[in-house]
Image: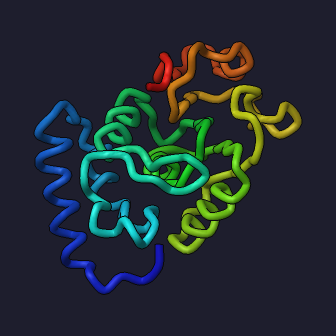
Amino acid sequence: MHGRDNKDKFGVAREQMLRLDLKGRDITNPDVLKVMAEVQREEFVPESYFSQAYTDGPLPIGMGQTISQPYIVALMTQELRCNRNCEVLEIGTGSGYQTAVLSKLVKKVYTIERFSQLSESAQAVLGRLGVSNVEFYVGDGSCGWPASQLPPSGHFDRIMITAAVPNIPESLIEQLADGGFMVVPVGYRG
């Protein structure tokens, strides 16, 4: 989350993650692969987990939450089928890693996090990295983005929920544009 002394070590680990965990599986979208190579996951993990920044597994980030494993971030991003004109609603900012990945592929990301501490931390990291096409909101993501602050179109081209939910909230379906895509892990934790 701060300046790094091990840039080369992380670069090697990032390349190995791309080759084995992403390309070696079913991540084939060249734009997604490029962004996964560019976004430095070590910027989003607590210092105590630096050595595990590129392991293909979730890591704790505080508040009982985790940063998703790189493969899941890449898979969900690939399945979202976004482009440079998309306005995306992300439910579950967490560390901001998925947000950073999306920000490099779309026009604008609107992201909701229920824990203000995580939202503030993600804002700080993304700000330090120069990411400027993200709007943050602290609240209950199942309610969607506040109606008074929706994009000019009144809808989102894509919606991503970053954690499993038992069902898709109706409020999110209502905020999805006609012809839009939603990527949601549906099921129960555990």
Q: Residue at x 59, y 13 (%)?
A: 167
Residue 67 locus on image (x, y percent) = 45, 49
Asked whether 152 or 51 is in front, the reply is 51
Residue drawn at point x = 14 percent, y = 57 percent: 16
- Image coordinates of residue 82 in percent, x first then y, are 45, 34
Q: Is residue 183 visible to us here?
A: no
Q: Classify the position of the C terminus by image quarter.
A: top left
| Viewer-nearest residue: 45 or 81 | 45
Q: Nearer the viewer, residue 47 or 110?
A: 47
- Whether residue 78 is visible: yes
Number of marks in picture: 0
Q: Is residue 9 left or right of residue 187?
A: left
Please state the horizontal and vertical placement of residue 22, each as a whole percent of the image.
Answer: 20, 42
| Residue drawn at the location 15% of the way across and 34% of the way down | 25
Quadrant in the picture for residue 77: top left
Q: Is residue 174 left or right of residue 124?
A: right
Left or right of 121 in this view: 32: left
For the point 55% across and 29% down, which residue is it?
A: 158
Residue sitting at the far bottom: 5
Q: Position of residue 64 (x, y in %)?
A: 56, 47
| Vertical side of 73 occupied by 81: above or below | above
